[in-house]
Image (cartoon, coloured by chain):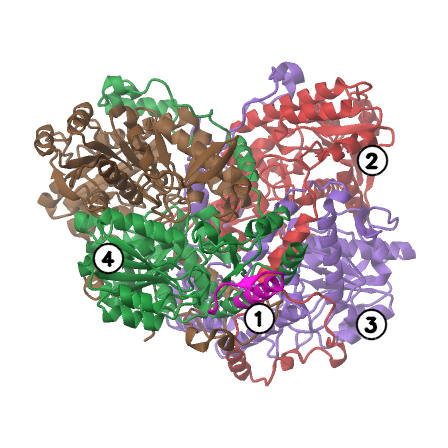
Chain colours: A purple, B brown, C green, D red
Amino acid sequence: MELIFEISKHGRSTADVPASDVPAFNIGDAIGSKYLRDDLDLPEVAEIDLIRHYTNLSRRNFGVDLGFYPLGSCTMKYNPKVNENVALLPGFTGLHPYADAESAQGNLQLIDEMQKYLCGIFGMAEFTLQPAAGAHGELTGVMMIKKYFEKKGQKRRIILIPDAAHGTNPASSALCGFEVVELRSNSEGGVDIEHLQSLMTEDVAALMLTNPNTLGLFERNIEKVAQIIHEKGGLLYGDGANANAFMGKVRPGDLGFDVIQLNLHKTFSTPHGGGGPGSGPVGVAKALVDFLPVPRVVKADDKYKWSGKFPDSIGRVRSFYGNFNVIVKAYTYIRSLGAEGLKRATEMAVLNANYIKEILKPYYDLPYDRGCMHECVFSGTRQVSESGVHTSDIAKRLIDYGYHPPTIYFPLIVHEAIMIEPTETESKETLDTFCDAMIAIAREAKENPDGVKCAPVTTPVTRLDEVLAARKPDVCWKRS
Amino acid sequence: MELIFEISKHGRSTADVPASDVPAFNIGDAIGSKYLRDDLDLPEVAEIDLIRHYTNLSRRNFGVDLGFYPLGSCTMKYNPKVNENVALLPGFTGLHPYADAESAQGNLQLIDEMQKYLCGIFGMAEFTLQPAAGAHGELTGVMMIKKYFEKKGQKRRIILIPDAAHGTNPASSALCGFEVVELRSNSEGGVDIEHLQSLMTEDVAALMLTNPNTLGLFERNIEKVAQIIHEKGGLLYGDGANANAFMGKVRPGDLGFDVIQLNLHKTFSTPHGGGGPGSGPVGVAKALVDFLPVPRVVKADDKYKWSGKFPDSIGRVRSFYGNFNVIVKAYTYIRSLGAEGLKRATEMAVLNANYIKEILKPYYDLPYDRGCMHECVFSGTRQVSESGVHTSDIAKRLIDYGYHPPTIYFPLIVHEAIMIEPTETESKETLDTFCDAMIAIAREAKENPDGVKCAPVTTPVTRLDEVLAARKPDVCWKRS
Amino acid sequence: MDYCPHTSEDIEQMQAAIGVAGIDELFADIPEKFRLKQMPDIPAALSEQETVSVMSDLAGKNKLPQFTLTGAGAYHHFIPAVVGHITGRAEFYTAYTPYQAEISQGLLQAIYEYQTMIAHLTGTEIANASMYDGASAMAEAAVLCAKMSGRNKIIVARSVHPEYRQVLRTYSWANGYTVVELPYAPSGQIDLESLQRKLDDQVAAVLVQSPNFFGVIEDIAPVADAVHNKGALLVAGFTDGTSLGILKPAGAAGADFVVGEGQSFGNPLNYGGPYLGIFAAKEKFMRRIPGRLVGATVDKNGRRGFVLTLQTREQHIRREKATSNICSNEALCALAAGVYLAALGKNLKRLSELNIYKTQYLKNKLLGLAGWKEVFSSPVYNEFVLRCPDSKKVNEKLKNEGITGGYDLQKNYPELENSLLFCATEMISKEDMDKVADILKR
Amino acid sequence: MDYCPHTSEDIEQMQAAIGVAGIDELFADIPEKFRLKQMPDIPAALSEQETVSVMSDLAGKNKLPQFTLTGAGAYHHFIPAVVGHITGRAEFYTAYTPYQAEISQGLLQAIYEYQTMIAHLTGTEIANASMYDGASAMAEAAVLCAKMSGRNKIIVARSVHPEYRQVLRTYSWANGYTVVELPYAPSGQIDLESLQRKLDDQVAAVLVQSPNFFGVIEDIAPVADAVHNKGALLVAGFTDGTSLGILKPAGAAGADFVVGEGQSFGNPLNYGGPYLGIFAAKEKFMRRIPGRLVGATVDKNGRRGFVLTLQTREQHIRREKATSNICSNEALCALAAGVYLAALGKNLKRLSELNIYKTQYLKNKLLGLAGWKEVFSSPVYNEFVLRCPDSKKVNEKLKNEGITGGYDLQKNYPELENSLLFCATEMISKEDMDKVADILKR
Ligand SMILES: Cc1ncc(COP(=O)(O)O)c(C=O)c1O
Ligand SMILES: Cc1ncc(COP(=O)(O)O)c(C=O)c1O
């Protein structure tokens, strides 16, 4: 498709600007022409062409509303339409962040209740909704850990992170000045307890654990892990991006986690928007409450307001109060499902993952053959060795079958990883036809490997030259 | 794609129903079980599957927002998004039709002003907004004509209708008990004046004229035509479906039309919704005002209200007041364009049609080679005789080029008619690439006629068996 | 605003290609003296921002009640969010009638599904793709019966919606048919004896509504027998479509045509429109019914597909001999209805039940007020008629509290003095109804 | 509500396929003692209808002002209807980050176009696909400068948004960097001499904003020279993005990074979020910047296509050595911004002008009030600071009339007593402003 710049023609526009109802004047004179720009190189398109451009672009994009999207670690569940609608209520969209508390009681109540609900579901003492995404929540959490030790007068340099962890975990730790030490996984995909014991010193601030981890496996020795960390005065950080595996079934706070971040755009069904906005609330145990970002909502005389008076706070990690409108959707989700509904979501998510795991086990290698939680991780090694078909080929071929591919090549500890997260909103029929496609591709890989390697063939473009893209980066269109 | 019934599974649903907050009871006992149904055979689908079903269906449908839609006589102009938005304001969508006048002043004002604007633009004495579509407006107009003569004590049996007319014209006349007599077109595509003179008697109630007619040609002798009709006491009815050719340039009222219906879903840019809702206001000259449908908006003491006190009215043609929410969009359109904008729309629509006509003239037969108004009508006869490629083949082939086909085989007086109405909202670039496609198809018809006859090849289904559909009609799915 | 993309160069180039020197030349066919010199009196063009502000002001001049107890042909129901998300898909709402089947499969299939749901729901065998509204659907059914039978009398129950009867009268007058009204019995149902008396061999059709305008459920089967015995056809309407979730549909009880308003299925009140006319019938009338029909067929490769079918009934083919003049219908409203029904599924029954419970509660509450009496004795769905001491005062009191009261029947039925038609849907809470009683007690 | 489609048979069949007898077996890995017995305290599930009613009530507890004179980092602009229609396309908003390029060309191309528009607008060479918000974008730029240079001091103008400075302090503290604040001159611009004095070879970056928090336009070129002379980098922010429609962008005046809040471009106020961080830079920093980047490339048939590129900067490849930890960004907000900018096109300049005219009018009106004085002398865009006799009373009076007044600067600048920061966008009419003056005269 042509770029919006390529269909631009001088003199056209979509949006007009009202005539001024106040006196106009020469702005160059008034402001000083040195402050003014000489050009304004934006596209010029009529409304019909703009709408066609973006509408047709949308049709070159795959979303949950078109079909199954089993992208592991991303919890691509269905986004209920009613949540979208209520989030568009003018009362929610129209308020300025500096509206006085009296005018914002609805929003403040929603924020306060949301924090309380999350505390209840996850067993934490307090939550902040300020972080804008999961990684931002991690950063906030790690900052609080840093502050906690600062307050204690301890200089702990290290954060332990399992080899299976999501890349944001080490990156967030590093962005906070910590040294990252990798913790090995054991043969059953859990924490290697001996290795942990050997690494755990008083120089270790925290272990960042994802539980269930990125293999979709629950840490059976979690009690032991927490004990090892806590005994040495360390903190246990939980990456809650996988909360769709346990909400309503077990609470991180009860398991010994001191800090946990959530991804509302995963577990709480707010749409991911093609890469955001997300929302990454962080919950903490009692010992860390004082370090939460400011401002925090407080209630007095039955009225809510913002307060910044928390001297030990790490400060702010974002302007204003977070991705408020995303939180509205997550709040709506919690209210409409209720406690039982949240639990059922978890149960069905785990059921679906185990079902896929069992059906596909004969066709793809399953490196850790045990009950999984909300996702299961296969390996494409068999296909590689048998016919040179790689996980990426299998992924691309799934597109031709009408599916979004699973997450691939992650977690890094599984060779040729294929990470499938079906979520609870998919029907058995969908899982069955998806498994049929996976099985058919396994057969194709044997019988017609070159066909698989050519996939996808049903898309507007075939496989793209990523090497070229990185070698000669073109990230900004230039008039030629 | 599967039918919604085929993906249905017992026990699923999208929409739930709140629990009762008032006492429940046995309804069979209360109402009598003979009044109750035994089965309720509706689809049962989860929200995710419902959304995917209909979203994927939408992707198998072509609309103006995807591309050029030059469907002649249908005025498929762009539907401005702001109109859609304001029509969704709760003040407009939320009111019950029996809301008291005091609560509905906004709606009543809008209706009153809309009628006034239409009177101004079309030079009529009064308008009704009650009819739900163009054909409904025609029926209403013809009814008023009937009433007019009834009042006069005249029994006129006949309505004259040109051979080029849209099918709704004769059908509406017949639904009102009139006999339809066909009026011939002359060699330049206008009214055959002599024929008209010979047909015009005191048994003729009216001539239903579309001007410009369905050939896109303006009736040069309109003054004469009106004179002939009026001299014999007849009325001149204008089918205003083609108003996009003249609004702001000439007024039917000034030309001598006594009744005219409009198609807001054409001229006034309300979206056609895949076949409705439309809106077909009818304007009348002074002599017919008393016959307008009831109720009518009246104003007293600066307040608007509905009044049914018009004893000569034909009565009602619809419940309530017409397709109100469609009228909101048309009103918005008029307000945002203003008089100058409406005129410019007409001018550009006519420019676009003439441009296409000139570009394609060398490649397709042009039965009436003169300046056209908002649409132009070619004939595919050359292609038929040269290579057996029919207009329907050309139409289907255009689909493969990414366009919606023009109207075909209408008007009936043109063999293998190809009726192209570009509208004013299309850019020169769009017209140029469309013409390129038409020219390419003319070449294909010569060089590869079988290829053209196979079209379309890019659609989810190829040409469908319409004969089978009519011979063994299956208009209701049955569980097999 | 201005939605024409042309720049002045575009216009010049196009004029040159056409061979004209200016736009006005394109309008040369319009006789000079008629060319509009002075533009009509319309307020100046608005920017988009101004447009929104003008329209918001206008919408703001309407006062939405807290809730409404009026139904009377238009019903306030909850619309699941999915409906608007689907009808808001541009591919649907910016399309024309699906003449070109290959690029209109989406709409064609959705309408085929709608037709099927409506046929099931009404207990008939077929349904068309929609009519303008309930009233015109009923009028067209009557005209059709007269045309098919060659008879020219139409009997309509007085308990049919007053506006439907008005529309019927207009259509019948235009066609030269006579309309005869049939009284209701004290039960609120039609007076069967009177019907027997009125039925003669000039009667083409009998038109009833169930639930009728008073909310009363009619006993269709004996009516159908009586009508058919005299060689006439039975056209049955309904009020609130959600009643079909629980009541035996007239089609199953012998009606030849089931027509009515489909607004209840996912379409907002919209001050009366756009709504959609439901038109369903026995299969034998398939080639005679008005309106569009979508049929299933196959493509050249044997794949299932959908087309507009039996078009020879329609005006664009048959012209003055068409079964109706209808062309554009209410496709998007029918799409909404289809999505609504698919969303509810079997829950439609639960919704109907809820409407009945609420209605009973409201009725009991109001009957507890001094001087209020039931007018009709037959069972009702979600509307009912009560006589009260002073109907004007009742509605006035409620209005002062931001509540729309009942529909005052005296306008249309002089004999029903101080009688109000009330409606309670799932949108009315117990609290609301208690409040109504409290207000009226004062 | 419940969005799981499984029927009880489905569940049974699946359990059988897995080989478990019940759901709880699937959670066997959770140590018994931790399994949740008692559900957390959350109100009972709601039907969709109840959900809408609960949420509407909550939204109704907020009071929207008639209009607001506060900007201060979030701006009330008109959003053309096209924006919501595009971001409402399900294919866009229900997608994840476009990792699988072949079925994500829509979003990838739209973001590539966004990057291009932002680079043009900011006068830089490249822009990323968005950051969380303006504040975190600025903080990340500062951290990046420190990392690249190995220096650990960051100078930030006090005239930068107070919350941005707070975020900067948090990020800097976490990384062990020192933040030094730079005073403003009486003109409202930064004190260039003080800057010169503070610049030493430990300074990694200087952070300014133009227009700055006081609405004052900074003179970027001399600042850039001074900064570059000491081997530091210049990070320039802005307040209201629409100012870029007319003001010379900092990139063109020598800034190395241009960062800021993109909310003004088609995103509603939303009580503070979601917004989007704009991050643009000179090309030479391309391989070091945080966040996603979409690049153009070709497919196997030579067709143009788009991919996420230079991913080796990112956490999922480089882990603790990544240039940032950012993963999800604000893609849909960036899409909105792209649509907004494409919709306005060159009209963005006219919009900027309108903002300036309105602002000047408001300023004059307020300066006409007894005791009101200008605080800064430099030119402004659409915000300005005035000192008044009693700022609290001013805002109180306006609030009583349903108007949000100015931002009281004393909270963040103790020296600016009774000083209010006012903002006038195209959403404020002459009438509104006259009314404000009238109210304050009383
Ligand atoms: C396990 C895990 N942790 C953290 C994140 C980061 O979340 P976000 O993309 O919202 O920053 C992700 C996202 O993919 C994840 O899967
Ligand atoms: C010339 C003409 N007249 C009348 C009509 C009927 O209008 P509607 O479809 O709104 O009933 C049409 C619609 O195609 C038309 O083109």
**Mark closer to the observer (2, 3):** 2
Q: Which residues are magenta?
A: C356-379
What amino acid type is highlighted by mark number 2?
Asn
Label 3 lies in what chain? Answer: A
Q: Quick check: do tags 3 and 1 share a chain? A: yes
Q: Which residue is under mark 1?
A: A377
Q: Earlier in the sequence, mark 3 or mark 1?
A: 3
> Residue sitting at 73 percent across and 75 percent down?
D36
Badge 3 amino acid: Ile
Image side of residue C330 versus residue A323, left or right: left
Report the disc number at residue D412: 2
Q: Quadrant of the N terminus of chain B?
A: bottom left
Q: Chain of mark 4?
A: C
Disc 2 to disc 3, C-alpha distance: 45 Å
Q: Secondary structure at mark 4?
A: strand
Identify the residue under disc 3: A228
> Looking at numbered disc 4 in the image, what kind of residue is underneath it?
Lys
Going by the image, does B366 lie left or right of A442? left
Residue C193 at x, y percent in the picture: 33, 69
